[in-house]
Amino acid sequence: MMDVLKIITIARSAIYRFTVYNYYKRQTTKLSLFVLLKLKVFGLGNKTYEHYNEIAIYVDHRLEQLGANRVYECGLGDDDANIEDDFITWKDKFWPAVCEYFNIEGAGEDVSIRQYKLTEHVDIPVEKVYSGEIARLHAFKNQRAPFDAKNPFLAPVKINRELHGSSSNRSCMHIEFDIDGSKMRYESGDHLAVYPVNNSNLVNKIGEICNIDLDTIFTLTNTDEESTKKHPFPCPCTYRTALTHYLDITSNPRTHILKELAEYASDPNDKERLRQMSSTTAEGKSLFQQWVIQENRNIVHILEDIPSLKPALDHLCELLPRLQCRYYSISSSPKLHPSEIHITAVVVEYPTPTGRINRGVTTTWLKEKHPSDPPCLVPIFVRKSQFRLPSRTTTPIIMVGPGTGLAPFRAFIQERDVAKKEGKDVGDTILYFGCRKREEDFLYREELQQYVDNGSLTLHTAFSREQENKVYVTHLLEKNKEELWRVIGKNNGHIYVCGDARNMARDVHNILLKVVMEKGNMSELQAADYIKKMDSQKRYSSDVWS
Ligand code: FAD
Ligand code: 2AM
């Protein structure tokens, strides 16, 4: 029963996040839980992951087993395609089913009801005003351990160095954070979370368009007094703080935001277009897909491109999602760097079809953080992971990490090198690294070469763009089937996969399957079982992101 309650809570929060905006706004929080007991599930997943929407499917199945009535079929959202579209298509049929089931009369037209009440402060003492803290007021001035997601540590930047060669038109940063005295602990394989700050030009632009003094101090208070969430973000704060620290102003807004914004467009054509984009009609969905998603417009671009649209800034602040921290695989080992945490981050920057340049919030912000006096401070915390070295140093390992997928493996290599220097027996440490060109984006080239030279590392490199046909790490793995089987089949070793290369993890999985079948003389079913077992024994781990 405990499990089911837990699952309901998780599922409820997922449903709540999606449903809270619509007509049923005031009732939805309560309704979601209630309806769920009658059974309706919408899962948020991504098809590139092996366990696609497994929780939603499990909850749906388990609730049915426990005797719940299915009000409407389980919906599965795929973030790799268009999760918004999946949801609104599902929701469109789901609400009438709920209304029918509970004998509720649904209103034909959606009515907007504000969830938060605005108060603008005139005489509030400055020490009562949040200035970017995640939870506790003045947490950034009075730093107190333990540090976590609600209480990040302000880490000084010790080093910020470019890892790409001069011929590269991209940038990859090696950043070292000083955690001395913070009591923060980490292990190789953990992730570092970074709370970013939005670009001030974008923030100012919103202030200009909404014609408001960004230094006005305000509070948004939930009109539902029973709600556990009193404010959408720490309040009171200035509009500038909200837009800089608390709100996501750079992703593509979801349809419900456009629907609410439509009311602020003074030109009837603009109003109609925004309404259409947020509708569930085929034309509306396709317009949204084209104008917002394909042409990659964020809220600033939308305000710029629809001049008659001048929303009330407090309403916009209510609608925009929270700015999320970003995770980075830690690229240092605590055995070598106990008082530092290193990350390896590619700067995100790309042109959009409207001729604009979009810049990643966190990486663009981090790019400007260099050692200085006083130091540049970055709010961070460590997130534990399951991505771990074998407990015995003698166990051989294969690591597959193209691009920034190398990050956690740098930590692994450091750690095993330290063990070797301490006189311990260390098994084979084999790295498959891939990048575009040797001179462009071969990360930590000299460092890796030193490990090769001192016998701590076997390195296989794939340079995808140095010849006519692509060469990937997966091609090398396929060639080295003997080595792969020797490590994982004969010597009970571990294999690790990390990176953002699309499809790479799946390709590695398929190669592994082939090798186990071929070298281990197994049928496909037996080989799949073998790999599943490796997975459960933590001998096969992946840490991939998209
Ligand atoms: P954002 O503002 O978040 O913008 C990124 C978004 O822009 C993308 O999600 C995508 O929607 C869009 N985008 C990016 N490029 C394009 C394009 N060419 N065309 C269209 N849209 C585009 N990153 C690392 O560099 N190193 C790591 O070690 C690392 N480890 C990670 C570990 C985990 C567990 C996870 C989940 C992610 C990891 N990442 C890593 C990714 C990292 O968390 C951030 O997503 C990344 O740095 C971008 O953040 P940002 O705030 O700069 O960009
Ligand atoms: P590409 O960009 O030339 O296609 C780091 O991103 C490296 O991983 C690049 O050399 C990239 O090649 C390569 N890469 C892209 N897709 C991959 C895949 N499916 N498997 C392995 N490597 C891949």
Image (cartoon, rainbow, N blue to C red):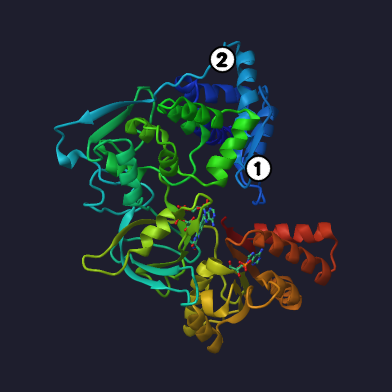
Q: Quadrant of residue 94?
A: top right
User: Percent position (x, y) of residue 236?
Assistant: 25, 36
Q: Secondary structure at mark 1?
A: helix
Instruction: Report the residue marked by disc 1.
Output: 54
Q: Nearer the viewer, residue 136 or 217?
A: 217
Residue 265: percent from left, percent from top: 42, 28
Residue 486 left/right relative to 239: right
Number of numbered labels in the structure image = 2
Which numbered disc covers residue 108? Answer: 2
Write the residue at 77% across / 63% down: 513
> In the rendered structure, which amino acid carries the disc numbered 1?
Glu
Whether residue 21 is visible, yes or no, is: no
Displayed-image quarter of ligand 2 = bottom right
Hey, which residue is sitting farthest bottom in the picture?
Answer: 453
Q: Residue at x 79, y 61 (%)?
A: 527
Q: Nearer the viewer, residue 475 or 490?
A: 475
- Let me know if residue 184 appears in the view: yes
Q: Earlier in the sequence, mark 2 or mark 1?
A: 1
Indicate left or right for 125 with 372 as reference.
left
* 140 shown above or below 485: above
Left or right, 163 with respect to 42, comes to left
